[in-house]
Image: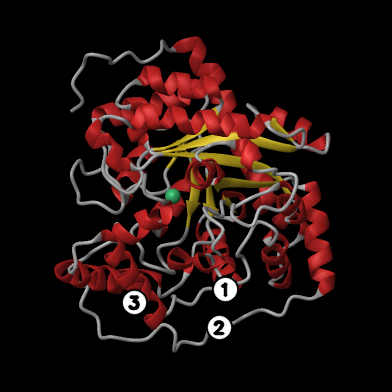
């Protein structure tokens, strides 16, 4: 199984415009607009986050546990710092994290060999064992659960499934995932699936197919968020047209600030305002940096050149790593992440923005400078306070927007369950 990092390297986005003049990202100022954050603002932010609660909608610790330790949790005591993992309990507490959605992630290439559902079960298994491995954690299934667990001083844990390929076109699998505790399904990951287009693949279905629209409506009936991170803009628009409940973007950014195809365009941000949904902002350097998309195009071009010369995968990995070292990473700081929050606030409104950092391994260099690990959330919120956000604004971004959307999603599900029968499509060819 390839690691997430290998996956990101080898699946770099390509476009026809990948012949930009060479420029060194290392030569750019390492921390443009690096904010000076005062201890007083940091204290105020920490106090608000303890109250909020702080909800992060995307962390890949289950995949990391499978990659680093083959899923053997006896190898990792999460009650002490774990430098090889993307989260542990002392770091989460230092970061004032109250609620974590653990990502159930399986690469979309598994759909070619029809092992996505099998691999998803391994991810659910490790995620559930993770949640039950320590008394500091408790599984939450509802917004009320989240508030009760947080009030009791524990960390509320939920699961989100990152990629519709994992249900293998089966509403039955979707329902079982919900039964296990999944509270969102990201419609696609990096590649298109039978019923939805991804942001980073070619246009195939022009959004959602009929099965895709039916599955969004089934998620509404079940009480599971439709997650529109990673999907194409047309899939976003289609889903927003058919959903009866608020949607989320579990780890996205604003397209206006970095034209990466997986970021959210302004017209969709305006639709999210009408829908009552929440766009959760990630901290991944190439997605938040204004230069991130250009950097990915350059990397894809370099990778094509390397692959034309080399065939051995280890040699290819080494060559692209050398390229990254020589060119440097695209610059991104706390200020850039705050800029995405500001932009979404400006276009969609303060009620429609949240946090979904997407910590996925222990290497801090892939995240915006200053937000390299889960202890760092208070610095971002201190920056928002420095920009004039009120206490109430901070509480909304930290978690209250998500709780509001979740309660509405639950209310819609309660109503639909009285009116609609479960979706049955098994045996029907997806179109
Ligand atoms: Zn992702």
Viewer-nearest of discs 1 and 3? 3
- Residue 52 left/right relative to 24: right
- Quadrant in the rendering for residue 62: top right
Query: Could you say which quadrant of the image residue 195 lies in?
Result: top left
- Name the spot of residue 198 as percent of width and height, x first: 30, 47
Residue 35 percent across, percent down from the top left = 66, 79
Q: Which mark is residue 323?
A: 3
The residue shown at (49%, 65%) is 366
- Sequence-wise, which precedes: disc 2 or disc 1? 2
**Residue at 76% across, 37% down:** 136
Q: Quadrant of residue 381?
A: bottom right
Quarter of the image with the C terminus is top left
Q: How would you rate the neighbour count of disc 1 (Cα within 10 Å): few for under 14, some for 14-19, many for 20 or more?
A: many
Residue at image mark 1: 333
- Assess whether mark 1 and mark 2 are in contact (beta carbons under 8 angstroms): yes
Asked if disc 3 is less than 8 Å from ligand 1, the answer is: no
The reply to whether the C-beta atoms of the residues labelled 1 and 3 are less than 8 Å apart is no
- N-terminal-most mark, 1 or 3: 3
Image quadrant in which the N terminus is located: top left
Quick one: SS at disc 1?
A: loop
Per the rendering, the mark at residue 32 is: 2
Tell me, yes or no, if residue 194 can be seen here.
no
Q: CA distance from mark 2 to mark 1?
A: 7 Å
Colour option used: secondary structure
Q: CA distance from mark 1 to mark 3?
A: 22 Å
Q: Is residue 214 left or right of residue 93?
A: left
Residue drawn 36% across the image and 66% down it: 259
Circle 2 SS class: loop
Q: Are marks 3 and 2 in contact (CB under 8 Å)?
A: no
Q: Is residue 90 shown left or right of residue 182?
A: right
């Amino acid at each position: 199984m390839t690691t997430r990092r290998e996956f990101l390297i080898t699946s770099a986005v390509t476009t026809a415009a990948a012949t930009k003049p060479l420029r060194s990202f290392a030569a750019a100022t390492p921390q443009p607009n690096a904010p000076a954050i005062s201890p007083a603002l940091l204290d105020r932010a920490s106090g608000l986050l303890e109250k909020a609660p702080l909800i992060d909608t995307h962390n890949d610790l289950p995949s990391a546990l499978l990659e680093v330790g083959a899923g053997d949790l006896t190898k990792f005591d999460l009650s002490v710092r774990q430098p090889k993992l993307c989260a542990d309990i002392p770091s989460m507490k230092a970061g004032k994290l109250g609620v974590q959605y653990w990502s159930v992630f399986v690469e979309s290439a598994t759909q070619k060999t029809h092992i996505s559902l099998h691999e998803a079960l391994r991810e659910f298994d490790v995620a559930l064992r993770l949640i039950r491995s320590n008394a500091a954690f408790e599984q939450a299934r509802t917004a009320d659960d989240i508030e009760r667990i947080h009030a009791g001083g524990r960390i509320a844990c939920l699961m989100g499934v990152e990629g519709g390929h994992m249900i293998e076109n089966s509403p039955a699998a979707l329902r079982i995932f919900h039964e296990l505790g999944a509270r969102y399904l990201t419609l696609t990951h990096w590649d298109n699936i039978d019923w939805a287009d991804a942001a980073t693949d070619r246009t195939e279905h022009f959004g959602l197919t009929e099965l895709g629209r039916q599955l969004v409506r089934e998620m509404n009936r079940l009480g599971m968020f439709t997650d529109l991170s990673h999907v194409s803009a047309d899939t976003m628009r289609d889903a927003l047209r058919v959903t009866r409940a608020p949607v989320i973007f579990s780890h996205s950014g604003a397209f206006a600030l970095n034209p990466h195809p997986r970021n959210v365009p302004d017209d969709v941000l305006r639709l999210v305002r009408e829908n009552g949904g929440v766009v959760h902002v990630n901290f991944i350097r190439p997605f938040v940096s204004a230069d991130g998309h250009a950097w990915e195009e350059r990397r894809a071009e370099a990778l094509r050149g390397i692959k034309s010369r080399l065939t051995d995968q280890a040699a290819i990995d080494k060559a692209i790593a050398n390229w990254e070292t020589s060119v440097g990473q695209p610059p991104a700081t706390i200020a850039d992440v705050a800029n995405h929050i500001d932009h979404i606030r400006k276009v969609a409104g303060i009620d429609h923005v949240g946090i979904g950092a997407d910590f996925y391994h222990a290497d801090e260099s892939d995240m915006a400078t200053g937000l390299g690990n889960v202890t760092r959330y208070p610095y971002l919120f201190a920056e928002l306070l420095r920009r004039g956000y009120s206490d109430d604004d901070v509480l909304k971004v930290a978690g209250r927007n998500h709780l509001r959307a979740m309660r509405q999603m639950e209310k819609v599900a309660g109503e639909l369950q009285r009116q609609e029968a479960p979706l049955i499509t098994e045996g029907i060819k997806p179109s």
